[in-house]
Image (cartoon, grey):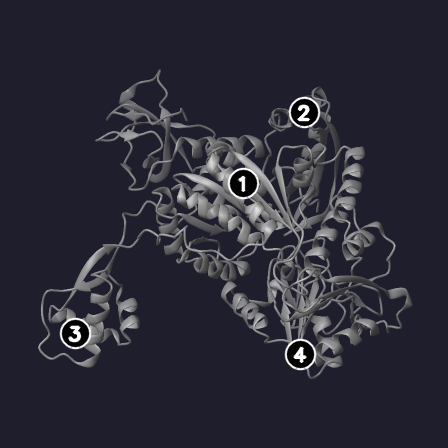
Amino acid sequence: MSTGPVFFDPGQRVAVLTTQPLDRLLTYRAPEGGCWQGAFVEVPLGPRKVMGVVWGPGEAGFDASKLRAVSRVLDVAPMRTEMAEFLARVGDYTLTPMHQMLRLATRAPGLTDPPSMRKVYRLGSGQAERMTEARVRVIEVLRDYGGLAFTLGELAEMAGVTTSVVKGLVKLGAVREEESPRDLPYPRLDPDAPGKPLTEDQRAAAEALVAGVRSGDYGTTLLRGVTGSGKTEVYMEAVAETLRKGRQALVLLPEIALTAEFLKRVEARFGARPAEWHSGVTMTERRRLWRMVGEGEAPLVVGARSALYLPFRDLGLIVVDEEHDQSYKQEDGVLYSARDMAVMRASVNAARVVLASATPSLESWANAEAGKYARLDLTSRFGEAVLPEMRAIDMRAEDLPGNRWISPTLEAHIRDRMEKGEQSLLFLNRRGYAPVTICRACGHQIACDHCDARMVEHRFLKRLVCHQCGETKPMPEVCPSCEAEGKLAPVGPGVERLAEEVGERFPEARVAVLSSDLFGSARALKAQIELIAQGGADIIIGTQMVAKGHNFPLLTLVGVIDADLGLQGSDLRAAEKTFQLIRQVAGRAGRADKPGLALLQTFQPDHPVIRAILSGDEEGFWRAEAAERQAAGVPPYGRMAGIVISASSAEAAFDLGNALARADQPLRAVGAQLYGPAPAPIARIRGRHRVRLLVKADRAVALQPALRQWVGQFTPKGDTRLSVDIDPQSFY
């Protein structure tokens, strides 16, 4: 798309990018009244009508009489040139076709519908002869709000009456019923409303961020602050400055469950709620936000990673909270890292980026070390809170039966906390009851029928579940292999098994289990988190979701059940992930005025990662980890791409993998190395066989053009699929 708006007169040729799986732009005639470049349009394609965007001038050199006209221009703000540039750059970087990028940027329902209307109610000119107390309250509410319109439900609730009272006043003419557009602007936020008082280092960090926003230039800052140091209050000042300048701000959060508490903090700070964008938002609200953000009528958006692709009119700030979190990596469809793409979007929009974390990703740490990012540090907790003390429990010295997981030392500390009326958190990063179910007669392990993965017993559901494909089946009475009865036994703990043990050892305790698979909706999860924060549990048992930014004021003890769990395996980020996760979980303790303690149960107390966690020498850990990665030439000091081929037959997947390996000249030409093909660590998911290849290159290599040329030599046949993951986070 060229720079600056271009208008096409009626009948002129226009190139339209559609969301359909086509490898080219389609040429149409501009409609009656003409259209702007960037206009969202509906165009005929075969017998159907599909949505698209006017991308530029159409193709010449063929008979114009054969061209079909654009059906209509949609009543939404046109795509801005910087948005088009951002989509093209993400497509180039991730090797994603543009039709898929457009689909990612238009993920809101009903965009092709005309703006829908709803009934609203305002003060009428008529008078009701008989004014009851309820009727008076309705009229008073409408007068108090200066003639503002309300929906029927809102007005009835504010007046404390039934909806029939309002409808009765409509018949009498005292209240007027009108049709109004459903997609209304979001409330104004007041950037000058007073924030919380800041400490000296918070104020200094906030002033640096505000100065960056004021400059109007692109820049990225790593805001590193220990857990509980008040990073949110600091970057809220940058949000306030963005709003003062009349620009829009986006705050990305890694978990829907975090939004409820965050929205309350925004409302307390700015006097109104911001717009929300995530999977828990209604379809109507998603459409409203998509439309309003393009018109500049949504000043602040709080959302999940896909909010990055909303059509902001003037985006001035992107905050990526908990920037190290793995959930910022999209693992299906368009494979992208929201953290990295946030930096790309800001550079296109001349916006600022704040990457906030207590335990930054090595990528961000290295960029700050190299001077690409500015870095601000908050070293102390806010208010009276102090950082928790951290200790290891050497499990080699603990007397623990084989079917128990809570050591006597940890048990004693939990009892002490219960006597004081304080909360304890037991962390185990394994969902379900037990990771493996084995037959004690023949040794058979129950596996998924469609994947090369063991099925996990979920006792609360009374079923076995595959964590790869979601397949479930009832717990069998007999072994599927040898048919022995009563010989199936769980091996290893999951959070449900831990909850069972807690129930036996602490029968008087109120226990809450926080695991993503135990909640049917985001709303139910939010309600449970609020209940815990108010003191509704003595012992909390949780998976990694408890590490993410939750604030439990009464929580003073964190027990990590298996600190060694993440240290095994071939993942190049294993040490980094373990370090981040345990430091984050430990940071949940002692966030109010009572001191916290974190206890790590480990069989390897001398492991470098465990030692780094206990000592709190984060810089030492990052330096050692960086040196190892640099020596190996892997990210962030080298480049990697993962290729996954999947097919219904292993032979078909390997045929394409071997053909790619034989034709690796484009990769060798840029000095890249190719590993594989080899069966993926999980070689079958949902009945499809998976083969992996890995490409490794120097940091300076332009890898994408070489990959495009290499992969472009082959067209997958039949049901064979090939995906390329630039900067892979997982290697399963």
In this picture, is 281 found above or below 104? below
- State the residue position of label 1: 353
**Labels 3 and 2: the sequence-earlier one:** 3
Amino acid on which the number 2 mark rests in the picture:
Val
Q: Secondary structure at mark 2?
A: loop
Mark 2 to mark 1 CA distance (whole Å): 26 Å
- State the residue position of label 4: 421
Mark 2, residues whose alpha carbon is within 10 Å: few (<14), some, or many (≥20)?
A: some
Task: Locate residue 452 relative to residue 93 in the image: left or right.
Answer: right
Mark 4 to mark 1 CA distance (whole Å): 41 Å
Residue at point 9% right, 71% down? 127
- State the residue position of label 2: 701
Mark 3 to mark 4 CA distance (whole Å): 54 Å
Amino acid on which the number 4 mark rests in the picture:
Gly
| Mark in the foreground, 3 or 1 | 1
| Mark in the foreground, 4 or 2 | 4
Task: Locate residue 259 relative to residue 9 in the image: left or right.
Answer: right
Amino acid on which the number 1 mark rests in the picture:
Val
Q: Position of residue 346 (x, y in %)?
A: 50, 36
Q: Which disc, if any, is residue 168?
A: 3
| Mark in the foreground, 2 or 1 | 1
Viewer-closest of 182 and 267: 267
Mark 3 to mark 1 CA distance (whole Å): 53 Å
Q: Position of residue 423 (x, y in %)?
A: 67, 73
Mark 4 to mark 2 CA distance (whole Å): 58 Å
Amino acid on which the number 3 mark rests in the picture:
Gly
